[in-house]
Amino acid sequence: MTMPFDTNDIWAWLDTVPDPEIPVISVVDLGVIRAVDIENERVTVTVTPTYSGCPAMSVISLDIETKLLKRGVIDPQIKTQIAPPWTTDWLSEKGRKRLEEYGIAPPQAAGGPAHCPLCRSKRVEKVSQFGSTPCKAQWRCLDCLEPFDYFKCI
Amino acid sequence: MTEALFEFLLRQGDNSLVLGHRVSEWCGVAPALEEDIALANTALDLIGQTRLWLEYAAEVEGKGRSADDLAFLRDAYDFRNMLLVELPNKDFGQTLMRQFLFDAFQVPWLTALKSSSDQHIADIASKSLQEALYHLERSRDTVIALGDGTKESNARMQEALDRLWPYAGEVFRDDEIDIAMAKKHIAPRPSEIRQTWDATLKETFEAAYLTLSEDRFAHSGGRTGQRHTEHLGHMLATMQVLQRSYPGATW
């Protein structure tokens, strides 16, 4: 028996599941979906946590399960895997672009935002290494004076 | 062997659990909003790491206990954390000094555990190390900023260091559990980490204008559970009250 969908369909569906804390990007953009497998008509999605204590992870798993159930997947399995550890290198290009449009500076290898996501000034300073969620830090722009979130680079 | 591995895993999990709870006590009362958020985030990372360690500990023990059972239903003498992390927070400077002394150990320690012969331990270490590096960056910078701050802030950081110092060295005293782990290449002997730790402290305290005592006396008894300070029981009374009062409560 063939199933009415394949792994590409599932990836596409998952790309419509928003990150619960940063809803402009999907869980696929975030890079937390490590694998989608169909074996013996059983769908398994492998998810990796961003931060080990991130409270959004249980919501993400639940949202994925709900989406798959709605699409007619029977008894989807959500597997958690911690290795290799998540890195911001796994954020998609689309995700980085959307973060910036939303007002969150995307991560940079240099360790700080490239520019203010609002006025694009390069004159920015760190307010705190931590922010409103485990994945963000607080920065501010010295030109437009607006505070903004920076997606921490790990 | 299983017993030694279980003890080893409890040490890892209990360090992050007890420190995570201590740091979380700042939530809502830190000196500035940014610091409040930073402390809460640090606590969250530590509690997340705790879950990884204690889930594995529970699995190794094989008696059907869960990570939650280990966290909420053990008494003080069953805890295997180093004494340093159970000491009360006192002021903000004391809290950050304790964090720095811990982070400066945790970073080289987790780095070494990444090459553990036990793949599960290597995986947990890799995950936790990213967070520990971030914590060290902040605790180190804050210790320097406060040490190299005003006369008052410098004096208080020196006081913090002097108070915490006799508790900091416990972890480097290898015991039979450490030796058993080293033999199986599961972990290095903690004493092998001391040089790196000393170097981080020396460099940081020089930049912070703080004086490190040459006295190497260290209280012990936390990692073995033989003699915790009186503070741990009080902390657990708060941390465990819900599960103790309403066993098995969920929400």
Image (tube, coloured by chain):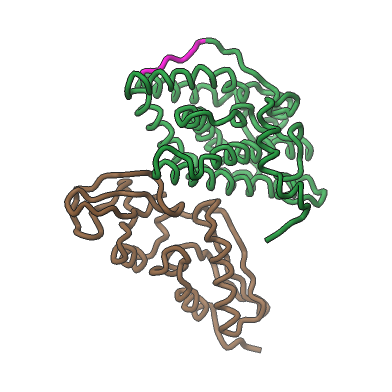
Chain colours: A brown, B green
Quadrant of the rendering where the N terminus of chain A is positioned: bottom right
Residue, far top: B215
Residue pictured at 58% horizontal, 88% vertical: A4
Using the image, determine if residue B97 lies above or below residue B249: above
User: Where B231 falls versus A55 (above or below)?
Assistant: above
Res B176 quadrant in image: top right
Left or right: residue A38 versus residue B28 is right
Residue A98 versus residue B64 in the image, above or below: below
Q: Measured from the top left, where is residue B113 in percent x and y?
A: 58, 38
| Residue B55, percent from left and from top | 69, 49
Q: Is residue A58 magenta?
A: no
* Residue pictured at 64% horizontal, 71% vertical: A77
Q: Would you say residue B186 is visible in this rendering?
A: no
Q: Position of residue B122 (x, y in %)?
A: 59, 44
Please name the residue shown 44% across and 18% down the image.
Answer: B158
For residue B9, what is the image quadrant?
top right
Q: Farthest residue in the right direction? A: B63
Q: Residue B174 versus residue B81: which sits nearer the camera?
A: B81
* Stretch in magenta: B209-214
Q: Residue at x 52, y 60 (%)?
A: A56
For residue B207, say whether it is visible: yes
* Residue B158, placed above or below residue A121: above
Residue A101 as seen in the image, left or right of residue B15? left
Q: Which SS type dominates the magenta stretch?
A: loop
